[in-house]
Amino acid sequence: MAAISSDNHGLRLVVRYAVLTLIAAIFIFPLVFMVMSSFKPDLQLLRDTSSFRAFLPVGDLSLDNYRDAFTRAPVATFVFNSVLVTGLTVLLSLLFCSLAAFSFVFLNWTGRSVLLSVILATLIVPFETIAIPLLLLVSKLPWIGLDGFQIGWLNSYRVQIIPWIADGLTIFLFVQYFKDLPKELIEASRVEGASWWQIYRKVVMPLSGPVLATAAILKFLVMYNQYLWPLIVVQQESYRPVMVGLQYFFQLDTAWGEIMAYLTVITVPVLAFYLVLQRAFIASIASTGVKG
Amino acid sequence: MATVKLRGIRKSYGPVEVIKGVDIDINDGEFVVFVGPSGCGKSTLLRMIAGLEDITRGTLEIDGKRVNDLEPSKRGIAMVFQTYAIFPHMSVRENVAFGLTINGVGKAEKEAKVAEAARILQMEHLLDRRPSALSGGQRQRVAIGRAIVRDPKVFLFDEPLSNLDAALRMDMRMEIGKLHQDLGASMIYVTHDQVEAMTLADRIVVLKDGQVMQAGAPMDLYHEPANLFVAGFLGAPSMNFMDVRVSEVTESNVTVSNGALDPVAVPRKGRDFTPGQQATLGVRPQYLSPAETGRGMLHGRVALTERLGSETVLDITLKDGSKLIAALGEDRILAPGTEVNLNFDPGQAHVFPEQR
């Protein structure tokens, strides 16, 4: 009996790992294809797509595509812009959305539940519907910067950052997480004499690692993948992010090898960011799963 | 150390009133226990004293000063929560010193106070641990330590032992009692456990439905309960109640009886009765004993025998079908089915005009 059951167990394990490997392969093959193709000349690249060679480092391999991509477009500038805009937006978003959620959950003020409902309702509004009104708005907003007073935010970093700082989803994530924190911790802090700011900084935030990681990664992906918004508000090359930069490679002669090289380069920050936060991210997804 | 005065304290959530006018005076250095069943408002009352709940009406004074509108931290109180409420991301030392850190107390003073609290609670060896590496009892000790270092006028305890297992609960109960002796501070302690109330309190306040049922020294409440609720709430096993009919009322006594109880004259303790009325007779299980001679006052049959070692608890079905618990000496073991006639000292019995 014992032997049979252990055989069963082994078989189940094999099947489970086979299925998991298959799923992992489905997800990783496009990435492998992208990286491999980035080293191949266009002709070979297109020929290889009909066979398994597309996923293998075979044939005429070189770094030419990378060299050409960097010549065709200011890739470093695009990556810098995207990392700067994304990084700042993520940081500011975590700060402001968590403060908003803190106020919704822990402070007692009239109308907070109504306002929270309104904020949550914005989750169902697609960005495309507000893109044009938002464009009209930011084109008329004033700004005082290093170069003095001016009207209009177009062609800047701020126009890519500020409208994206506060969003319903991030606030919602924080609200849900804060609601699950034991309220006695907050009450004990109040009895001990902590101000609301101290409670936020010394008690709530240090306990919010999982939600900070989740919110950061979701925000990072949204921001790094920005396309429509920067396309309409940024005409100057020096402020352009990576996704808009992709257009440079889709002109008269589509250079597939260079596109693959470009994509490989711009994927690196995403992977780096994910790897840093991976543990916290998985933990938070897993814990929300358990709570159902 | 300070006095606490509650005057006409009321609390409403919308149209629902949960605290219905409470007046309590707590003396300097007194250990007062609020006890009552769940939902009686005892925790709400404590939280109102702490400042975690608003006071709808009435006046709360601590140390002679009205504190209704003061922030919790300005009231001179420290609170220990049922769930300990210690910060999981800080070491024990940081937890205990939290209030001092927040209030900008100097490093030397802070360390001295933490060391003193750790000494009192015998947890010097735990100071650098994280809460996750502590047992329930140790965590509660940390919470108490955090209260001690603030040197509060009044300690507030909100069911601090409810999350501990039975053995630990007894240890911690004794420690809290000892802490009160050592510090001599005023303490208000909320529990639903009447054993904690009886053992710890200088004075017990029994609450029900947001009202004070009776307040007084533990043994006074035990021996002279003001009403049916207090009589039934304090004491284990709880007091036996029998539906009886009043046959005679004199200056000092009232004579009652029912189908299983021969007429007996019980002190009426100033309560008003009229002959013929229905009333409730209360006798504690410890005051019942099998009749050695004669036919006894109460007649029934043993339904169940529980041997607890120190005593034997008999579950008795009386002649009229009602149930009765008798707690006898350890060797008084009667087999189920045995007919019993029981006696009790009428001086230890209580008659209440209200019915169950």
Image (cartoon, coloured by chain):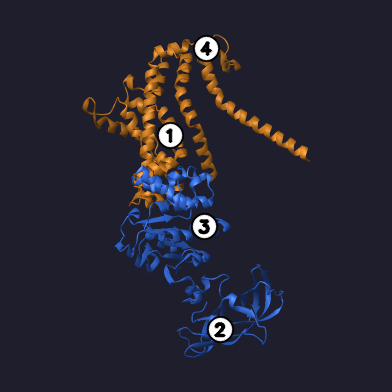
Viewer-side label of 2, 3: 3
The front one of B353 and B345 is B345
Task: Tell me if I can see residue A124 in this picture.
Answer: no
What is the quadrant of residue A72 in the picture?
top left
Q: Which chain is orange?
A: A
Q: Which residue is mark 1?
A: A216
Residue at figure coordinates x 49%, y 51% from the top left: B122
In the image, which disc is placed on residue A40? 4
In the image, which disc is placed on residue A49? none
User: Distance of mark 1 from mark 3, alpha carbons?
Assistant: 44 Å
Kindly identify the amino acid type of the residue bearing the numbered disc 3.
Answer: Met
What is the quadrant of residue B258 in the picture?
bottom right
User: Distance of mark 1 from mark 2, alpha carbons?
Assistant: 75 Å
Q: Secondary structure at mark 3?
A: helix
In the rendered picture, chain B carries what hue?
blue
Q: Is residue A181 above or below residue B270?
A: above
Q: Secondary structure at mark 2?
A: helix
Kindly identify the amino acid type of the residue bearing the numbered disc 2.
Answer: Pro
Q: Which residue is mark 2?
A: B346
Task: Tell me if I can see residue B252 in this picture.
Answer: yes
Residue at figure coordinates x 71%, y 37% from the top left: A9
